[in-house]
Amino acid sequence: MGISYDLLRTFLIVYRAGSVTRAAEILGLSQPAVTAQIKALEQALARPLFERLPRGMAPTPAADQLARRVADPLDALQGLVEGDLGGPAEAFGRAVHLGGPAELICSRVLPSLAALVADGLQLRVTLGLPDDLVTALAGGALDLAVTTLRPRRRGLRVDPLCDEEFVLVAAPVWTRDQLDRAPLVGYAENLPILRRYWRTVFETRLTRGPALVVPDLRGVLAAVVAGAGVTVLPRYLCADELADGRLLALLDPEPAPLNTLFLASRAGTAHPEAESVRNHLLLQGPTWD
């Protein structure tokens, strides 16, 4: 039996959506029709692709391998199908709505996309926290979202984007010996980044509260450079200050604490402009830190 484009496209959407029900909604087909296509593909390949669960479909290793092989070609072909093949068209005909944390968007994402904007990309940016961004993405208000946590919501396609390394930093007026009494500076009252660093590096619970809270890591950076106290920042955000001596890394643990950032989009086919931005960011992300 031959393997058609339609079978592979249905497979990829089920794979990304995690359920036949959601895939059927995306494809505009009945659930039995989607199930029949998956069974036909499994018969053609002579191997199971999904384990049927009470609430969804769990991909087998064969499905993971197939998805890696067909995802990029199918996405590219879908972009051509949805585009204007009858004549010349603008490279970016629709605006792309992108969300993410303010610090990463401003310091890494926007500079990475500047060339695309110069070539005609229309970009609309929303800054926010992971839960709000994922809700906006799932509801259709965003095409893409960069999140500091892996979204668990069904119907989303989630890719690792980059790793951020955390560094314990202070201005030269503070030393490692003063760490126990240095004021703590964070972006939230519960000091999530500092608490994670303490738990990972010192293997203990941070019990002190913050002296200063600024709901933007760029503000945290400015305060610490001015001597307000100690904080933990992503290295990409304070690399210049570390290089010129305005900040000092108080510790150099091995391995350094890392956090993976993710790029999320809705499962199924995205419009070509959003797909172009997604592919560009996935290529650029590993070079950011």
Image: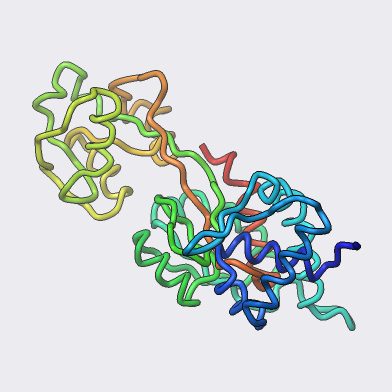
Q: Quadrant of residue 236?
A: top left
Q: Looking at the picture, how far across and down is residue 210, in whole percent? A: 12, 42
How many discs mark residues in the rendered view? 0
Place of residue 148 in the rendered image (x, y in percent of width and height, measured from the top left): 40, 50
Q: Residue 106: x percent and y percent?
A: 45, 55
Left/right of residue 77 with respect to residue 219 in the rendered view: right
Residue 278 relative to residue 172: left or right: right
For the residue pair 102 and 5, the one nearer the viewer reads as: 5
Q: Is residue 153 left or right of residue 182?
A: right
Q: Residue at x 28, y 41 (%)?
A: 193
- Residue 38 lies, in percent from the top left, at 71, 65
Above or below, comparing residue 118 to residue 229 in the picture: below
Camera-side residue of 10 and 236: 10
- Residue at (24, 44) in percent of width and height: 192
Toward the viewer: 94 or 266? Answer: 266
Q: Residue at x 75, y 50 (%)?
A: 47
